[in-house]
Image (cartoon, rainbow, N blue to C red):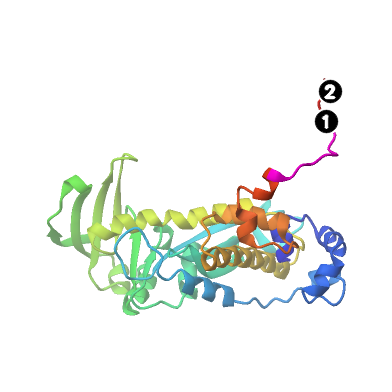
Amino acid sequence: MAFAQLTYRESLRDIETCLSVQVSKLYSMGFRDPVRRSTLADANEARDQRLITQARRLYVNEDLGFDLANTVYALDSTTIDLCLAVFPWAHFRTTKAAVKMHTLLDLRGNIPSFIHVSDGKLHDVHALDLLLPEAGAIYVMDRGYVDFARLHVLHLAGAFFVTRAKSNIDAHRVYSAPTDRTTGIICDQTIALDGHYTRQHYPEHLRRIRFRDTEAGRTLVFLGLPATTICALYKSRWQVELFFKWIKQHLRIKRFFGTSENAVKTQIWIAVSVYVLVAIVKKRLGLDASLYTLLQILSVTLFEKLPIHQALAQDDPKCDTLQITNQLNLVAY
């Protein structure tokens, strides 16, 4: 299935056909029998998380772009559209099916540390119920995750959060800290919630930052950390959007080899595993090439016994001296 992701196969039959011409090489890789469609269709539901653990260890000292020792996570989801007639179990709307990929992205290396695949109707905020809060970690989220009872759970666990405030938040100012408006920070306030339920769900004080984004021409209101950090952190949340875009563009999670719920979830997990595997190769070998470049090279050299550094070399010295005498001319004079 990883072969299908790396080489852009279209179906189980396509995978079986392409692997059948590599029998000798498959045997050397530990495949004692031919790969059959039935074997692929019965892929085990259990997934191996060891790749994610290895990748996060490799990228633990990666520079975030700002001075923070904390682990920083971006939490978001993306919707993967499906055909309702083919995937009736993934009912989303009246005429549409979909699944959601809820992802917690470690911003040091952009490695997914948690992924949950649900039906398309599950609201984003419920992903917070699935997390095990990490003390000292910072969770960056959009307004869809503003639920003060769930945010208080993060606070009690010793974690921090950064999110956009909703426009209808009911709160009063407790204290205002001085700000430098040249940085775009209009106000830095400590607030207390006034809503009947919200003040019960989050009885602690909150930090509210009002920031003027001159590039976008709009004013943003944040809840969470001190003013100098909160704006930079929220901008970094865009990395999880780039991760979703990369996965959808360069791996196969829009066209599925099976129609069952297990088949769809398995294929999404395999796509993520391939992404993480390429990230591990890049870091361990100290390669400067992008993940996209590595993916493209692997797609055409998958069964070649060729050092990856050689495959990445732009100039092959052998090509300069090699004289091909029997090549035909394609241009008639």
Q: Which mark is residue 332?
A: 2
Q: Is residue 332 magenta?
A: no
Q: Quadrant of residue 42?
A: bottom right
**Residue kind at label 2, given as amino acid type:** Ala
Most frequent secondary structure within the magenta stretch: loop
Height in image: 217 above or below 200? Answer: above
Residue where numbered disc 1 is placed: 329
Judging from the image, what secondary structure is the residue with disc 2 in? loop
Residue 110 vs residue 215, the one in the foreground = 110
- Residue at 14% x, 59% y: name it: 176
Q: Which residues are magenta?
A: 321-328
Residue 104 in picture, x, y percent from top left = 48, 67
Residue projecting furthest to the top: 333
Height in image: 297 above or below 271? Answer: above
Q: Are marks 1 and 2 in contact (CB under 8 Å)?
A: yes
Residue 113 in picture, x, y percent from top left = 50, 71
Judging from the image, what secondary structure is the residue with disc 1 in? loop
